[in-house]
Image (cartoon, grey):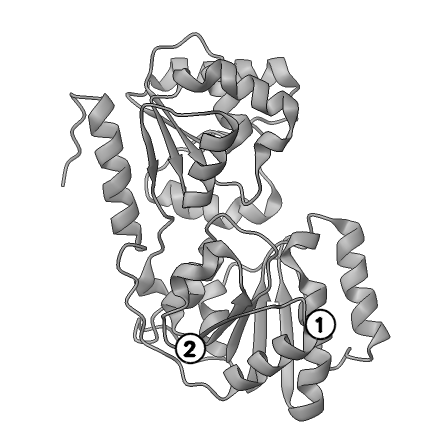
Amino acid sequence: MASLLPQQDDFAAIRAELEAAGVTCLFPTIHHGRVGKLLHLYRVVRQFRPDFIVAHATLAALYVRLLPVHTPIAWVMHSGVNDFENGALKQAERLLSRRARAIIGVSQQNIDDYLREIGKHPAMVVIPNGVDASLFSEDNGASPPDIAVPAKQIVQLGRYIEGKSQLHTIRAFERVVQSEPEAHLLLCGVVEDVAYHDAVLSLVRQLGLESSVTVCGPRSDVAAILRSSRVFAMPSRFEAQSIGFLEALASGIPVVASRIPSFGFASGYAGVSLVDTADPEAYSRALLHALDTPRANRQLAGYTLHDTADRYMTIARQFVRTLRVST
């Protein structure tokens, strides 16, 4: 696995887990410019001579298709927004489109955006993200929750950016504690937008919620947090197909999320409520109801890691006839 950017501190634990499983992780030691990024990727390809390249996200897919290599490339579109509203990216994609042997979207919205902005491609497919459901089940042998965890904890996991709408959750939570004084809100995530993170802290203080809201950074114990919490909140304004959302579904925790297209597939699952999270009254009512909702046993057919891996391997075998994987 190769990155265009140096490793961030919060990735250290994940990298250790990957390398323990035999995955080589290559990060540049410094922030390169455009030419440096190309050279870094070229060295990686020359060193490993891959049979197939999977390029995740828009910029990585553009860079790798500029390389003078004949290796089949699949581009995976992860973005929750239409990247082609940027004219330069749209023009670059039109020039490089056929350098990708396959265009993969994690949601139908990705494919629809591509068709509208770029046009048809010979191989286009939707492959949803998948999760290891066994890590999040209640019977996986994990230790019981810490007794210090508040009994009625609502949790939101996600980067601190405007699109994740933590401010909506805080405004709704102010109404929740008026009816449920023992409720607690836990916000966790990477601080990507410092100004927005400051706005989150400021709103907590402004509403006098310091004793009921915990604002913290990224956490590596997501499964334990989901097991010990009572409600999972996800008021995102946009998502492609969120891993965090799938993890919450796999854990069985009641879920209150925004009514956006990428979450629509979960509307039929037990304990899932999709609402207008920009409306603090509607959002708070849904959170209060979820606090009294039991956990559910959800079967995520089509959204497991095994499902996702099988679909990627099917794509790879279409373009690499000699590819064999030991089982």
Question: Residue 153 is drawn in which quadrant?
Answer: bottom right
Q: Nearer the viewer, residue 263 or 145?
A: 263
Q: Determine the residue located farthest toward the top in the rendered image.
A: 68
Above or below, 5 relative to 204: above
Q: Nearer the viewer, mark 2 or mark 1?
A: 2
Q: Are there few (<14), some (14-19), or many (20+) residues within 10 Å of tag 2?
A: many
Q: Nearer the viewer, residue 244 or 277?
A: 277
Tag 2 residue: 271
19 to the left or right of 116: left
Q: In x, y percent, where is residue 134?
A: 30, 64
Q: In x, y percent, where is residue 145?
A: 47, 79
Q: In x, y percent, where is residue 215?
A: 70, 67
Question: Residue 211 is drawn in which quadrant?
Answer: bottom right
For mark 1, give the secondary structure: helix
Above or below, 220 relative to 187: above
> Which three-letter amino acid code belongs to the residue tagged 1?
Ile
Tag 1 residue: 170
> Which three-letter amino acid code belongs to the residue tagged 2?
Gly
